[in-house]
Image (cartoon, rainbow, N blue to C red):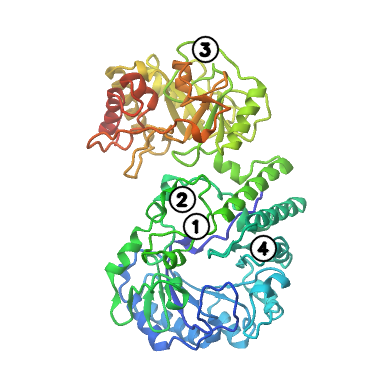
Amino acid sequence: MKITMGNELKEWLNGRAREFTFGVTENCNLKCKYCYFLNKNNKNVMSFTTAKKAIDYFLNDPIQYKEEGVIFEFMGGEPFLEIELIDEICDYILQKLYVLKHKWFYRYRFLITTNGMNYSSDKVQKFIKKHYGHLSISISIDGNKEKHDLQRVQINGKGSYDQVIKSVSLWQKQFPNMSTKATFSHDDLPLLKDSIIDLWNKGIRFVSANIVYEDVWKDGDPEIFEEQLNMLADYILEHDLWINNSVRFFEAQIGFPFTREELNQEFCGMGNHMIAIDTKGNFYPCVRFFDIALSKNKPIILGDIINGLDDNKIKPFKFLQKKNFLDPECIECKVATGCGQCGGYSYDMSKNQTIFNRTKYNCKMHQANVRANKRFWKLFELKTGYISPRTMLRITPTTSKDTYLYIITDSETLPICNYSNENNIRNIMDDNMVMNALEYAEKNDLCPIFIGESKLNTGLYFSFKNSNKNCEFSIPIFDNGSLIIDNNTNYLSQSCVLVVNRFNIKDLLHNCELLYKKFIRINFSLSDLILWNNNMIDNFVLNLVKIKEMYGNSKECNFITDINKNDDFVDCLLNKRSLTIAPNGKLYRCPGFYYYNVESFIGDMNDNYDDLDLDLNRISCSNCKNYLCNRCVLVSKYDTGNESIASNRICYLYNRIKELLV
């Protein structure tokens, strides 16, 4: 099913190109009210000599840059006021790339964002014709005439819409797949819905809309923002606009906790993959560090065209991963993803002139966006009957993507992890409790995952079921008794769970041969690991070695191919990331605690999730570098009496895996 809504146009080379931004002029023919350049409309213009020296410096040492491509961006002020200079700079860049036989000669891009006032001029059109094919141009249009003219005004205070809109049809013809950037601030929030719709009606399918990062928001703005987004959502669904159109406010990935991988990523490429050059030839992390963009703190100059870049000045920007840039409140935020931020503005607002700072003026606005986003995709599912991209993100379990509520609807369902129904508990969750569990998950932003069957219409939720072949979002579970693979059956899941116990370890290789005919991935559930001795563990690991020798990495397996490449433990999902509700209505740390001691519950659905005692004081194992170890909390509790300390059984298992497989 085609779903365009929430998608962004793909960045060239997936955003992995080196970027040099030339601030060719500080002059502009507009005076936009929300512009972050505080002292533009002056006459400072970059000379060709300055640009030439910058190009010479950056291109003369290709070994310095690992990126396979390069973007040369031209900004102002309004860059097209200096179109002849830009043309001359582009010619020199191409000449230099050719002479140097540079690796970027065929992998370069010229990027310009313009206000559109001069787009139709002969000089600009001549430039476009000359460099077409390696050129991307975006025109900033805020929406309908009322919205655009409220913010994007000329020097004389008059609106610019009528002049800009004349060039839109020509721009769309030349760059049919480009997006426009619509920026919203306090004054124009009530015009958001109509503005986005107006842009779509003009054929601009992708609207890269955002709210300003500055401290402009007032009481009541989040409510207005959410109301506008909800009305826009209703209009989209009424007219099926999600098929061909998109706006950033409804990106599926907005409003999730950060994964460990995301926290290790750069939040922005400033100063590392991106360098900006001002009219004087100074180098900056990005244009937001120019002196005309800062109101409180001094510019951060990384070097200049005479002395080059200063490695010591650049070094701090190499550590701008989210985990270093954000404070604990942001790192632990349940709706962190998609929250807009600007490193330059955050630096300007920092009290001690540090780049490791994050402003929070738009927190409530982001929360409003998240609520509207969740509402939109839920209504989308009700209208279409399809799983939304947002739900797809939530029902894809990862080590840290989300917080989960495992709902045991049938206690006789085969185990999905290191536990088994040793006490022969027989309980089925009634439908009312299932509904209550789903409401608890929704209220606390937990991803519901069913363990077992449910009579309810639960197709929108991820589930584990005994050898189930019909539910699109379930993973089938097999043990020796149910491992009958019908070659005529097409299982909808590419993954399965294989229950391994002390009695069927000897059958592991044979069972995998059967399952790998139908599945790409097998997750082993060591159901009675609590009862394994070292000989059993050795037999299990030796079977893993045979499986790896047979399949290599062509097939996935949690114990073979899931090697954590980060210097951090995989850990199990219990540390504030997982919760289980059993058929008796009680909450447990994981399904295993329910099966081994039904009295070990930590609360029920009347308890506030945030008040539950879920924190684990993990004790680090001295000098251990075995990052494969998931330190199962259940086994730790069973063996040592303490959930926080890995047992010898766990240590032996993962050390043998590391010894023989890694």
* 10 Å crowding of disc 3: few (<14), some (14-19), many (20+): some
Which of the numbered marks, if any, corresponds to residue 360? 1
**Badge 4 is on which residue?**
189
Q: Which residue is tagged 3?
A: 425
**Res 614 label:** none
Which of the two labelled residues, at mark 4 and mark 1, occupies the earlier sequence position?
4
Classed neighbour count for the residue bearing mark 2: other residues with Cα under 10 Å, few (<14), some (14–19), many (≥20): many
Relative to 318, say whether 399 is above or below.
above
* SS at badge 3: loop
| Element under disc 2 | helix
Alpha-carbon distance for marks 3 and 4? 56 Å
Residue type, numbered disc 3? Ile
- Disc 4 marks a residue whose amino acid type is Leu
Q: CA distance from mark 3 to mark 1?
A: 50 Å
The spot of residue 615 in percent (x, y) is 41, 33
Q: Is residue 619 left or right of residue 180?
A: left
Q: Quadrant of the C terminus?
A: top left
